[in-house]
Image: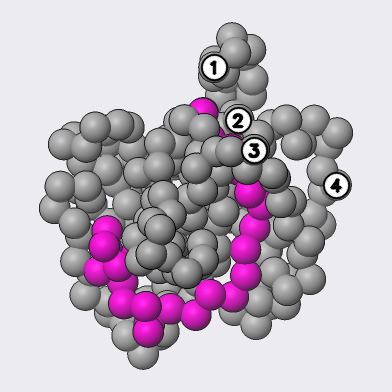
Amino acid sequence: MIVEIRARLDAYVHNQLPADGRPSAAVLIPIYQARGELHIVLTKRTDRVEHHKGEISFPGGARDPEDADLIATALRESHEEIGLQRQHVEVIGRVDDFITVSQFHVTPYVGVIDPLAAPYRWLPQEREVAEILEVPLQHLLDPVNLVRERRSMPDGRITDMESFRWRDHLVWGATARMLKNFLDVALSPNRPPRPQSWRDQNRICPSGSSRIGG
């Protein structure tokens, strides 16, 4: 399956949004092989952080001046937040840029964790990360775990949103959109064409994302 995911990411032309002066950020979508199946690694934020307390996110954050590029940002933040060592990750592609409600320009990268490193010794950053979630890929692909609901957008519009349920957690907002984008690109047998409103939908994402502010 990793071979297929890699090939589809290689062939995908991601949507690259202009930053327009917004701060740059990056997240990592980690693929982790454990217990005989593939997982996606997510984090639950603590109640001690300033923004988005208790929400589910990918490891990631704002670019530092010392970061060589946004891949370096995603890998640095993943190491800081969950203890994922750079040498254990192979970045195999990226999906679409997103502009979050907190006005960050976010680039999601997909990384495969070395299976020889499993079971991984996660080291969650105590102040920021309450829990590390290893969610089976097959669980995310099962339509029964996809939740559709209506949410208010920052501009007052009401829009239909898709979220993912994992045990007692709900993955929603920008994290859910990035996750859905990845699943559609990498694994959907018949990826539907982008609707004409697709660009506007991805330009401003509601909260429910990582430390960059959703």
For the point 69% across and 69% down, which residue is it?
A: 9
Tell which of 167 and 176 is nearer to you: 176
Q: Secondary structure at mark 2?
A: loop
Q: Which residues are magenta?
A: 78-101
Q: Secondary structure at mark 4?
A: loop
Label disc, if present, on residue 204 of the rendered structure: 2
- For the residue marked with disc 4, what is the amino acid? Pro
Earlier-in-chain disc, 2 versus 4? 4
Q: Mark 1 and mark 3 in contact (Cβ < 8 Å)?
A: no
Label disc, if present, on residue 193 of the rendered structure: 4
Tell which of 34 and 69 is nearer to you: 69
Earlier-in-chain disc, 2 versus 3? 3
Label disc, if present, on residue 20 of the rendered structure: 3
- Mark-to-mark CA distance, 2 and 4: 20 Å
User: Which residue has dot 1 on it?
Assistant: 154
Residue 85 painted magenta: yes
- For the residue marked with disc 2, what is the amino acid? Ile
- For the residue marked with disc 1, what is the amino acid? Pro
For the point 64% across and 24% down, which residue is it?
A: 160
Q: Mark 4 and mark 2 in contact (Cβ < 8 Å)?
A: no
Is 15 drawn above or below residue 116 in the view shown?
A: above
